[in-house]
Amino acid sequence: MTRSKVAGWLLIVAGMLGGMPATAVTLQFHAWGGSAQVNDYLQWVAGQVEARHGITLKHVKLADTSDAVARVLAEKAAGNHDQGAVDLIWINGENFAAMQRNNLLLKNWVSDLPNFKLTNPAQNPAMTTDFGLPTRGQEAPWGKAALVFYYNQRYLSAPPQNVQALLSFAHTNPGRFTYPLPNDYLGISFLKYVLLALNADNPDLLYAPVNADSFAQVTRPLWAYLDKLHPVMWRQGDYMVRQASHLQQLMGSGELLLAFSFTAAEIPGAVTRYDLPETVRTYAMQEGSLANVHFVGISYNTAHPDAARQVVNFLLSPEAQARKQQLAVWGDETVLDLSLLPKAARQRFVSQSSHPAALPAGAINRLLPEPHSSWTDALREAWFERYGARW
């Protein structure tokens, strides 16, 4: 059987699974709610699974995914093992590690999804690895993201291209750059990006479980860097934003000249909505971009595991993945291996749209994988111990 015929068969089987009638149920999808584009996309998904399966999908908008993790953990402690309030959860990194460690996720279901095969997991280990941890069939890949920067070219013609240039920019333009507190996902991502950039010659320690010696060695240049950066940040570093969305607001008001995001497509989307000036442009640092795959998990105590699997299988369908990748919708890169799709399905991913504020094609010349998940909590705790007394 040829590769294209195999792909066609997979799509047929996936369609058969997707067309199976489901008992009318309501699922709670706990997912970050800080992006208008993400929220609109999930609204579209809800309409699709309602029409196709009779499943009512409600987006529970989160500011911090750990809140949903804590809820499942509390339910388990209370003995609620089959009527959980969190059916689906958008997770990765330390939140996945916490749920896996505490047995809070449904097990051994991902490989049974027909559309999961279209990610080509045997040849793409990123589909089964989350911040250095094997997923063990407890979460399904959903999309890819990378850290990008954006600036207002009306006032800044040559943005910094690496972390040392960023420090120089901050000193030359005091008060025009900042980053969120590291209990926000974007804030901790910035710290990890700087950490990787400053240890580019020897990153191996960052991909192994953290210990006291490796942490002290690797973070020494980070603290020296931040000690120089903080006094020249927005409001002299005496006040820091708490959420990623606040960065965009400060760019929109003109208080900042430079900011960053883990969702490249949200920048042109914000320009289109007039939340950002039309002179904003997106770019990637030349030394590389922190990148990861994000996943969807099903809680171990959901009352509707079959319906939850149907929703995830739809999220992995070529139709849903192609729509999510459209710049005007979300711009989130697909996790599917397009070479496995028939030609007609591949055509869904051919974009004809462009936007002056969008990240140029091929702009990211190097992906920096996320450090081992154990580094996240260690880094956050050390940051607050060192700098957090002010907040």
Image (cartoon, grey):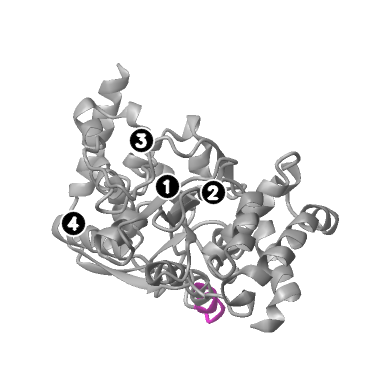
Q: Position of residue 143 (x, y in %)?
A: 40, 48
Label 3 and label 4: CA atoms lie apart by 20 Å
Question: In terms of sequence position, does the residue under pointer 2 or pointer 4 come before the other?
Answer: 4
Is there CB contact under 8 Å for labels 3 and 4? no
Question: In terms of sequence position, does the residue under pointer 1 or pointer 3 come before the other?
Answer: 1
Residue at 67% in and 48% down: 196
Q: Which mark is residue 118?
A: 3
Q: Regarding mark 1 in the picture, which secondary structure is present there?
A: helix
Circle 1: residue type: Val
Q: Does 347 sit left or right of 165 as displayed?
A: left
Q: Does 172 sit left or right of 329 as displayed?
A: right
Is there CB contact under 8 Å for labels 2 and 4? no
Nearest the camera: 313 or 346?
346
Label 2 and label 3: CA atoms lie apart by 17 Å
Q: Which mark is residue 48?
A: 4
Q: Does 221 sit left or right of 125 as displayed?
A: right
Q: Quadrant of residue 385?
A: bottom right
Residue 7 visible: yes
Q: Position of residue 315 (x, y in %)?
A: 31, 50
The residue identified by callout 2 is 135
Is there CB contact under 8 Å for labels 1 and 2? yes
Is there CB contact under 8 Å for labels 2 and 3? no
Q: Position of residue 77 (x, y in %)?
A: 56, 78
- Where's the N terminus, which quadrant? top left
Determine whether 171 is above or below 148 in the image.
below
Q: Which mark is residue 110?
A: 1
Which span is picked out in magenta? 72-79
Question: In terms of sequence position, does the residue under pointer 1 or pointer 4 come before the other?
Answer: 4
